[in-house]
């Protein structure tokens, strides 16, 4: 039953014409005819059921791609406030699924009138300007077809990577008559501005040859570049696009998320045939970050596209952060097709290459800030201690510039050390990937990685598999279900059993304990 004071406050609120707000965490109850309290379904309690209905209706692939990171923030004034981590997801869900989310939510919680979507920051906070309040009555759940097309056009023209003020982006739709829509190109990222070293010489040569190839069948098809973050993959891809455009070729440069966006938008707008024809009519297709392709139907369409282009003698250039054989989330036939061309790795930058990259960055800054002076000793120091990637080198130049312009003092070794201290990661253990664990353990125990991922249960395979699962749990931040998926789609309980078993064996077996410690050191060095 309601307390007397609460009833009085509730009554006064109703008399004043106010709608009593409630949040997703609040439970509602009311007395029935016999004066007993009967629990009602709350908005928060209804939300998991809404997500289950979405999962069943849309399928696991679509749900994971678009709704896996959608969270219910609160419910107030008959509006469910939901958050997503990126503007892209917000725009996509508003344009294509808001009406369906509202329909399913109202089926579970009839009191709801509206849904709104906003973007939360990395700390989980919601930007104040993003949510739609009850006083701004645009119903987020109603998106006309014309609005969907407008959003698609806006997304296609929006840059997907941050650029320095000096950068100029060229929308591919306007760059040349032969170009077709895609991600905009950064005018700075050309072959002329790419700095060549031992780690990237082969990748540069192959990319340049492909871009300037004029007659005859496509070369090295597909050309597949793979490397870690900030080592020059995107630079080379955009350089290929710029050069091929100069050669008069019909090109399209897409990131994986833009490919997914375009394909799903075409399906919803019933223009999938035009989408396919457009991709198959080009001379050069460039796809970046292919490891992010998700969804069975999307991967199938990507596979059909590359098969069609290769069979027609058209060129394909692809980049990812790992080899084709390590793209576990990608369809096996697609991986096989990608591995059938020229696969080139861009290795870590050596110290000499880092020094030359730094010198080029400093010269570019001096064109705008002529007073910016960096002693040779400081350049050598930065190149020696920042051994990660080119983006960290850019960050170092920005910090050095900020120091000289804000303090007005010349750079010294001491001030440089203080300015870039947060970028020096030499003492941090490197980030360990599950794929690396599987490869190392397989090599140490004379089995293949395919054996570890297989259904085989022989003792020679089970023990390495359990050790690899144990190391994945203690050396990565992956959850048990995610680790299970990376080990051939196994259940999280299988992973938990393996972790507990190896923990017990390590406690009792000194030899195994030493072996595990050796594997950990090898993975972290």
Image: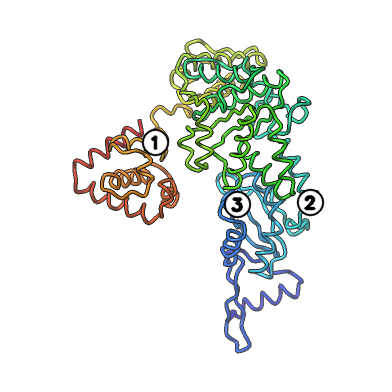
Asked if disc 1 and disc 2 are in contact, CB closer than 8 Å, the reply is no
Using residue 460 as the reference point, say whether residue 207 is left or right of it.
right
At 40% from the left edge and 46% from the top edge, which residue is drawn? Answer: 487
Q: What separation in Å lies between label 2 and label 3 (alpha carbons)?
A: 20 Å
At 58% from the left edge and 43% from the top edge, which residue is drawn? Answer: 299
10 Å crowding of disc 1: few (<14), some (14-19), many (20+): some
Q: Which residue is mark 3?
A: 62
Q: Which residue is mark 2?
A: 145
Between 191 and 426, the one lying in front of the other is 191
Using residue 234 as the reference point, say whether residue 431 is left or right of it.
left
At 30% from the left edge and 43% from the top edge, which residue is drawn? Answer: 464
Residue 150 to residue 410: above or below: below
Q: What separation in Å lies between label 1 and label 2 (alpha carbons)?
A: 46 Å
Q: Which residue is mark 1?
A: 436
Element type where label 3 sits in the image: helix
Point out residue 114 in the picture as x, y percentages from the top left corner: 72, 61
């Amino acid at each position: 039953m309601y307390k007397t004071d609460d009833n009085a406050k509730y009554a006064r609120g109703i008399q004043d014409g106010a709608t009593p707000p409630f949040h997703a965490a609040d439970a509602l109850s009311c007395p029935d005819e016999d004066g007993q309290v009967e629990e009602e379904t709350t908005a928060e309690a209804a939300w998991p059921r809404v997500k289950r209905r979405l999962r069943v209706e849309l399928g696991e692939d679509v749900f994971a791609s678009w709704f896996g990171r959608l969270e219910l923030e609160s419910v107030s004034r008959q509006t469910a406030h939901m958050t997503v981590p990126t503007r892209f997801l917000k725009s996509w869900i508003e344009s294509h699924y808001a009406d369906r989310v509202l329909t399913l939510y109202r089926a579970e919680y009839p009191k709801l009138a509206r849904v709104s979507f906003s973007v939360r920051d990395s700390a989980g906070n919601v930007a104040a300007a993003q949510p739609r309040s009850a006083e701004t009555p645009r119903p987020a759940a109603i998106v006309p077809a014309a609005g969907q097309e407008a959003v698609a056009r806006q997304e296609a023209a929006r840059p997907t990577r941050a650029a320095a003020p000096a950068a100029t982006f060229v929308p591919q739709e306007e760059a040349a008559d032969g170009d077709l829509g895609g991600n905009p190109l950064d005018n700075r990222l050309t072959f002329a501005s790419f700095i060549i070293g031992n780690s990237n010489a082969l990748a540069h040569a192959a990319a340049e040859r492909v871009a300037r190839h004029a007659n005859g069948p496509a070369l090295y098809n597909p050309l597949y570049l793979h490397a870690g973050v900030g080592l020059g993959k995107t630079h080379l891809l955009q350089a290929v696009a710029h050069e091929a455009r100069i050669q008069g070729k019909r090109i399209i440069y897409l990131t994986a998320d833009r490919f997914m966006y375009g394909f799903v938008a075409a399906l919803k707008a019933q223009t999938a045939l035009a989408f396919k024809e457009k991709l198959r009519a080009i001379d050069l297709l460039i796809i970046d970050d292919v490891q992010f392709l998700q969804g069975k139907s999307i991967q199938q369409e990507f596979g059909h596209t590359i098969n069609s282009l290769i069979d027609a003698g058209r060129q394909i250039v692809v980049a990812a952060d790992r080899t084709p054989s390590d793209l576990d989330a990608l369809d096996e036939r697609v991986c096989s097709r990608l591995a059938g061309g020229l696969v080139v790795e861009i290795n870590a930058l050596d110290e000499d290459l880092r020094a030359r990259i730094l010198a080029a960055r400093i010269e570019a800054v001096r064109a705008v800030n002529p007073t910016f002076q960096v002693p040779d000793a400081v350049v050598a120091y930065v190149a020696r201690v920042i051994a990660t990637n080119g983006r960290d080198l850019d960050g170092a130049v920005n910090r050095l510039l900020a120091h000289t312009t804000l303090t007005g003092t010349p750079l010294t070794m001491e001030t440089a050390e203080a300015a870039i201290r947060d970028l020096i990661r030499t003492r941090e253990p490197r980030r360990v990937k599950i794929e690396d664990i599987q490869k190392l353990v397989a090599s140490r125990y004379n089995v293949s990685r395919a054996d570890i991922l297989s259904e085989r249960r022989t003792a020679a395979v089970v023990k390495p598999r359990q050790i690899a699962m144990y190391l994945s749990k203690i050396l990565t931040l992956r959850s048990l279900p995610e680790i299970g998926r990376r080990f051939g789609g196994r259940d999280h309980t299988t992973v938990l059993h393996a972790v507990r078993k190896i923990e017990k064996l390590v406690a009792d077996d000194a030899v195994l304990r030493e072996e595990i410690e050796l594997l950990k050191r090898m993975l972290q060095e």
